[in-house]
Image (cartoon, grey):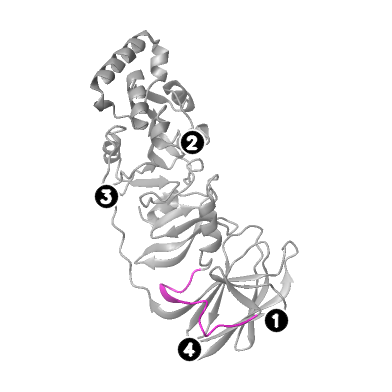
Amino acid sequence: MLPKTLLPLLAVPGTNETPRLVVESWAGDQPFSGWLVDRNRQAVARLLNFRFRFIGFDAEAETNAAFHCLKVSTLPPEPQPVALPLDDARLALEGWTASAGRLQSTGAPENTLRFGSTAPLIGLRFYCWPNGGVVEVLRNGALLGELDLYAATAGLPATMMVENPEGGACEVVVRTTGRHHPDAGGAEALLAGVNEYSGAEAPPRPLPPLPPLQEEPALLPPFMDWVANLPADGLALDIGGPPRRGDDQRLLKLDWQAFDAPHLLADPLKLPFRDASLDLVHANCVVNQVVDPAQLAREIHRVLKPGGWALVGSMPGNWWRYGGPHRLDLTPAALQQLFADFTVCHAQSGGDLSHRVLALLNWTGADLNRTPRKLERLQEWLAEYQEAASPAAQSSLALWSILHLRK
């Protein structure tokens, strides 16, 4: 689903507030890159290649928010920017140094950075952070304005656009003042980059192809059938797991890691959707990996429309396949209790003591097929123990469980 179509459904994570999209570049009439910001102009998501990455839930995303963003205000229609390398000979530095892909000043008064340009529009991108001070920007010696680079937390940077309407040679100067916000820890300045805009429009960028349909036959095989039966304006959300979206524009893929280019990178415990905005939610083996499975259940319930359906798969006892990310071993009864708020809950489970033990032995690397007699005897013993187990014990040994839920 394209950004313009998706925007009315999105919300600032943890709220029902509609975010505002600040567009950096377009592909035809669709936003190609930009930012989602809240009412305080703080970034909540990055739009890149038609896909949204929500921030605030992992260190990698926070770093992207602080150091890889471009601007906060809309530029002229589809400009073609050319980045000025920070080691370009045109840049004259007095009291500024190049460090970690940026230009830095300690903030001492009169530290200057200057360069000449003939571009009709020049964009200066500064980081905002707790030690940011006040800088001045001049064109041909005339003061254009000041920027306060202080921010309580690293967020969207400040941008100063320098116009050169006559297109002749002009000199741009960035000068630190030594002044800073009362709460700032210093008066430093960090310049993220310089863009020169020629005025030429950027060529349209084609939509990237969607990956081929990939189903998991062992779990939830009816999922794509459910998607196919949605109304034309319906919307399904797949949380985690391999891609199942094929070419159906009604299916969105959300993940908390950059796996197979999902549409949305976000925290599954704070789904970035408005209340009652989705028709179908699918979460396979996610409930075993999150730190708060009850919160996941509440979020799925919240974003579903009344009468909407959820398909939830769990792999209790299957931690040996997935390793570290698998946090909890939930029995079928515990899984049903987590989703008790739903009006309909159909549960099915599979696997028994024999399946569990053999799967664990396979995980250890034991080649059971090399010793067929021992394998046969082991299966016989496990069958005897299985017959002696109570129904409750047999249920708790399930290798997988599936819930069909209706709000």
Question: Which mark identifies residue 130?
Answer: none
Res 354 quadrant in image? top left
Q: What residue type is disc 4 on? A: Gly
- Is tag 3's residue or tag 4's residue first in the polypeptide sequence? 4
* Residue 189 pos. (x, y %): 64, 71
Q: Is residue 81 magenta?
A: yes
Q: Which residue is mark 4?
A: 167
Task: Give the residue at mark 3.
Answer: 247
Looking at marks 2 and 4 on the same chain, the residue that comes earlier in the sequence is marked by 4
**Which is nearer the eye, 63 or 267?**
63
- Give the amino acid at mark 3: Asp
Q: Which mark is residue 110?
A: 1
Question: Can you identify the residue that label 2 sits on?
Answer: 296
Q: Which residues are magenta?
A: 74-94
- Is residue 123 shown above or below 305? below
Q: Nearer the viewer, mark 2 or mark 1?
A: 1
* Along the line of sight, the residue nearer the viewer: 100 or 60: 100
Q: Position of residue 169 (x, y in %)?
A: 51, 91
Precedes in sequence: disc 3 or disc 1: 1
Relative placement, left or right, of 306 versus 159 is left
Q: Callout 1 environment at 10 Å: few (<14), some (14 to 19), or many (20+)? A: some
